[in-house]
Amino acid sequence: MAAITYRDALNQALAEEMERDENVFLLGEEVAEYDGAYKVSKGLLERFGDKRVKDTPISELGFAGLGIGAAMVGLRPVVEFMTFNFSFLALDQVINTASKMLSMSGGQIGIPMVFRGPSGAALQLGAQHSQACETWYLHAPGIKVVTPSTPADAKGLLKAAIRDNDPVAFMEGELLYNVKGEVPDDADFVIPLGVADLKREGGDVSIITHGPMVHVALQAAAHLAKDGIEADVLDLRSLRPLDVDAILATVAKTNRAIYLEEGWPYLGVGAQIVSIIMEEAFDDLDAPVLRVTQADVPLPYNKKLEIWAKPGAARAVEACKKVLYV
Amino acid sequence: MGESETATVGVVNGAPALGGFSKEKLLELLKQMLLYRRFEESAEEAYAIGKIGGFCHLHIGQEAAAAGCILPLRQDDYIIGSYREHTQALAKGLSPEAVMAELYGKASGTSGGVGGSMHIFGVDVGFMGGNGIVGAQAPLALGMAWAIHYRGSDQVCVCFLGDAAVNQGAFHESMNMAAIWNLPVIYVVENNAYGMGTKFSRMSDTEMVKKAAAHGVPATVVDGQDVMATYAHFDALIERVRGGAGAQFVDVECYRFKGHSMSDPVSGTYRSKEEVDDRTENADPIKLLRDRMFAAELLTGEELKVIDKEVRATVAAAVDFAEAAPEPEVDTLYENVYSEINPHGRLFFDGRGK
């Protein structure tokens, strides 16, 4: 076990899976000669050659479709979007073909592939480059959505996503690439999709979250601890499949929960989670479940406004205290 | 007209022939086209009495495009098409029974009744589907061609598009990548001159073949009502692509005798009755081949009757099969959305809880 960055963990996962299965190849803008816009694919061109690490034109719709077509006949493409913000150009192929192919073909044609890249805000990138894109991918049945928050999760979940027989949208945190953590170097270190991880244990309130917000939740939990409040921080890790049992278990334990997410509130991930808690754990609740989300506006460029619009630890602390009535 | 117009009656390997085609091959083309025609006529009848629902786009009038482009292919070659794809599915080798049952939405259909008219698939014969989104099949064909290249195989992928699809970005992105990577894909525009009710020339200021020139993809034009010309053209082109010639574009000029879909009259606001009558009378691909074979004494009226009777029996059997086939069971609703039931988290959110 070694401490490596989230970026290197993803790189290891790609390299190990390409080594293990010759049907796996990487495709996208700047993935080969440039080593990746965020250097996730560094060294892979040299190691695997230009058939398996392929630079594409700036044609998101076209190369996403290329990946799907290749998956239709048995390859296992990993399509990199430079950011998921650009993947909206490809959504026709993702939603109308990848997510529906197995069903429309009566089970004849599966789409074993991964769409991956950063999602969510970085710093002052403006409205078009700062979106948390989960909801677009979650709404349609037929696709899976994974959001790793730590280097170990990034590696274990990416390996699982590549081995999965369904299309998986794998959304990385743009601000997480330099985060370091212990990562097992076992070539078969795989984290199954659909298993949440309790990143912090506490009995008073549950902060349920995913992706980069896990780190914000941990900060909030540290603040709460100073006031003698111990929070569970549940990292869902994958949003489809969703570990509903883990959500119900933390709610049963604390009886109070908030959902913290980077995206917008309207029909956001939290809306679904709150609905599940209401439907399946109503009797466990001592307070309404609250959501902490980005403000319902396109993210502004101005630094002060951006910080104000993004969900932060202070707001999560405030929401936790509200459900605790303190 | 195509090259067979000037062809002469001759001898192929000692047998009577026309334009380099043996009598046997010509009879096969004729029989196939008749099968497509009778199949679509039956689908039209079934639609009229509510046995087939939703959208249904008939291929009547364009049979030569399917026969001429697809019959020269190997079974392990891939084809993918648009939503006007019933006859391409038959041409690639799917059974009329399974395709008709799919139109009927029955469990014995090609997709178990889940797909419908626009989503027919036959992996075993390399029929990789219809697609309900105009032009969306272009990148998928690119991906299959990429897979062929990736594996070093000598298969070919043929992508059928309607003429309106060349105005989609997906088409141009695909042509560009197919060209830069020299992939074994043939983009075939079945150019019936109308995208739904809009004449191609109203929506494009450039000729069809120039769409390919911009990407450096060689383009050719063939008379798609002439099955001999179409077959000969594709027979040669497919072998060139198999040999490494790279991406190709073919403008197959054809004509749709029926409306865009079942809700669209044959003629009306966008094309005149005179135009449709003229093409139906003078450019029917089945009649054209029949008359050529009559003239060359390679077919008699009696032989034609026998062939048509056989084809009608095949289609009638397909209809009987579809009528008798079971409906899918309601408890199969959640099947094939994901490849397996996930052992961990929940995949479906139907509001019913555990």
Image (spheres, helix red, strand yellow):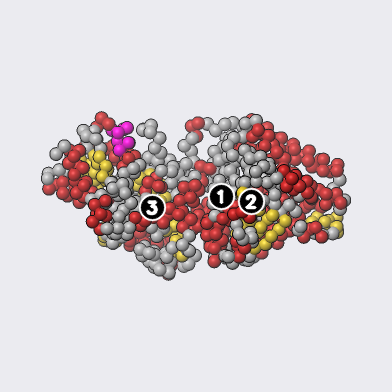
Residue A178 shows up from this direction: yes
The mark total stands at 3
Q: Residues within 10 Å of mark 1 (few under 14, many from 20)?
A: many
| Structural distance between the alpha carbons of marks 2 and 3 | 43 Å
Of the image marks 1 and 2, the number of the one nearer the N terminus = 1
Residue corresponding to mark 3: A170
- Residue B349 position, x and y percent, is 39, 37
| Structural distance between the alpha carbons of marks 1 and 3 | 28 Å
Front-most of residues A108 and B302 = B302
Of the two numbered discs 1 and 3 in the rendering, the one whose residue sits closer to the viewer: 1
Residue corresponding to mark 1: B134
Q: Amino acid at mark 2?
A: Lys
Q: Do marks 1 and 3 both belong to one polypeptide chain?
A: no
Q: What secondary structure predominates along the stretch shown in magenta?
A: helix
**Disc 1 element:** loop
Q: Which residues are magenta?
A: A274-281
Q: Which residue is pictured at 30% across the width and 33% down the height?
A: A278
